[in-house]
């Protein structure tokens, strides 16, 4: 596939947005379009994100007030939190990777059916 | 607004949900075979389930003007027992000619075990032998990355499998690129707590484009929302995506993939 088979690049101007077809290889359109300005993103999502951040902080306070030790989930959680600082892109992907099983071989037997949200290192 | 719900477990939903989906503009609902929340004790239980998916649910959906399609398989959560899986897989060919069957799915992995992998290979073989579309379930949470890689390797190793006839479902930010890079389709599942939220799904669309991606609710017996697809369309609209772009993602894309099955036909 070539030019024109890919996604649509929005072009804004007089008469509203129109769309320019792009090549189909998604790597070619990486970050090509950004529909909203940063101000618009903040206007739309800041309060929601702030609310979620306070919830995270309260969760950590709750866990740290409780007796006992961290387990692998909380350790993974803290590792994932460290991915939020700084200006590196793809923070959501980095957080998901921090919780993921990095091994490659299938396990001998399914230990059950459920997932707990963090790799336990075994 | 019109949309196709390409992944919903309607046997677990109420009739009210069919009505709400129809009100929201749903034109068709596609139902992969999945885990019932408990393990079935015999192949006969699956036989009845396949009858439910191919006979009963289409009638229930039709009461609200909805077309109902189904996918058949034994799911990965019941795949640890390879003998049972083999007996269930042997039942499937007799159902493949039924008019609402789209292909084999949702096959895949759950805990990335050897037996799950063996059963996945058996079902890929089935799909290849009968030239069926494939819908793949990728594992949950911490198991998704590894499971997605293992699944892609199984599919790559069979030269009969054409990537454009495979949809890898439940992708997230850490797995979507590897799926699209293989030439396959990728499904984003919209769940309240796990998988994608509407906002994250739209982020992925804005980063990777609108080609070979679809949205689904995967609504089932757990916490899930049968209206997640139209709600994500609203999220796209809030961000300034125009109606044509929204229509491509929620209607044209699933239609384009599903039309590769001769059975996928919508009323004109």
Image (cartoon, coloured by chain):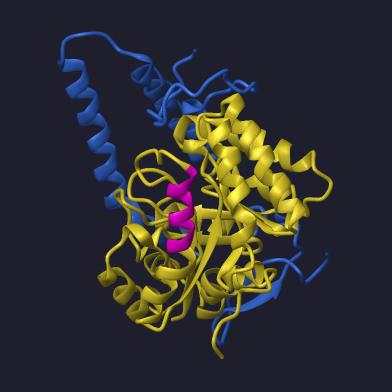
- Residue B55 vertical position relative to residue B11 in the rendered view, above or below: below
For the view shown, which residue lies furthest in the top direction? Answer: A68
Question: Is B56 above or below relative to B42?
Answer: below
Q: Residue B158: where, in percent of width, then height?
A: 80, 43
Please name the color used to draw chain A.
Answer: blue
Give the side of residue A55 with respect to residue B218, left or right: left
> Going 50% across and 35% down the picture, which residue do you hit?
B110
- For image coordinates 57% across by 26% down, the residue present is B113
Choose top left, top right, bottom left or bottom right for residue B233.
bottom left
Who's the residue at 23% across and 37% down the image?
Answer: A54
Of residues B60 and B209, the one drawn nearer to the viewer in this rendering: B60
Q: Is residue B20 visible?
A: yes
Q: Which residues are magenta?
A: B43-52
What is the magenta segment's predominant secondary structure?
helix
User: What color is chain B drawn in?
Assistant: yellow
| Residue B46 within the segment the image draws in magenta | yes
Check the picture and name the quadrant holding the N terminus of chain A.
Answer: bottom right
Task: Residue B86: give x, y in percent of width and height.
Answer: 61, 39
Picture coordinates of residue A107 (x, y %)? 57, 20
Left or right of A3? Residue B263 is left
Query: Foreground: B175 or B75?
Result: B75
Q: Quick check: B227 above or below B145?
A: below
Identified at 59% across, 69% down, the residue is B98
């Amino acid at each position: 596939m070539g030019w024109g088979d890919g996604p649509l690049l929005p072009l804004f101007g007089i008469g509203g947005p129109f769309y320019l077809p792009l090549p189909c290889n998604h790597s070619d359109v990486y970050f090509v379009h950004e529909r909203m300005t940063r101000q618009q993103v903040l206007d739309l999502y800041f309060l929601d994100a702030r609310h979620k951040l306070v919830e995270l902080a309260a969760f950590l306070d709750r866990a740290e007030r409780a007796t006992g030790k961290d387990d692998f989930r909380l350790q993974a959680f803290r590792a994932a939190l460290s991915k939020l600082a700084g200006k590196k892109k793809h923070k959501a992907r980095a957080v998901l990777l921090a919780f993921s099983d990095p091994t490659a071989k299938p396990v001998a037997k399914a230990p059950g059916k459920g997932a707990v949200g963090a790799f336990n290192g075994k | 607004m019109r949309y196709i719900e390409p992944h919903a477990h309607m046997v677990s939903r109420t009739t009210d949900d069919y009505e709400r989906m129809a009100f929201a503009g749903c034109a068709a609902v596609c139902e992969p075979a999945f885990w019932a929340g408990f393990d079935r004790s015999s192949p006969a239980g699956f036989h009845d389930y396949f009858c439910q998916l191919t006979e009963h649910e289409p009638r229930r959906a039709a009461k609200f003007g909805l077309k109902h399609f189904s996918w058949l398989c034994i799911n990965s959560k019941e795949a640890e027992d390879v003998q049972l899986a083999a007996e269930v897989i042997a039942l499937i060919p007799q159902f493949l000619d039924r008019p609402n069957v789209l292909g084999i799915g949702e096959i895949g992995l759950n805990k990335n075990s050897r037996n799950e992998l063996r059963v996945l290979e058996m079902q890929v073989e089935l799909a290849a032998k009968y030239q069926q579309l494939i819908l793949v379930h990728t594992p949950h949470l911490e198991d998704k990355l590894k499971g997605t890689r293992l699944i892609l390797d199984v599919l790559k190793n069979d030269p009969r499998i054409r990537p454009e006839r495979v949809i890898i479902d439940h992708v997230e930010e850490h797995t979507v690129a590897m799926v699209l890079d293989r030439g396959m389709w990728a499904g984003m599942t919209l769940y309240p707590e796990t998988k994608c939220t509407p906002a994250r799904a739209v982020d992925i669309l804005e980063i990777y484009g609108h080609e070979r991606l679809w949205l689904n609710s995967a609504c089932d017996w757990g916490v899930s929302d049968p209206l997640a697809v139209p709600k994500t369309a609203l999220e796209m609209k809030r961000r300034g995506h125009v109606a044509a772009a929204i229509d491509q993602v929620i209607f044209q894309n699933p239609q384009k993939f599903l039309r590769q099955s001769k059975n996928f036909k919508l009323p004109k």
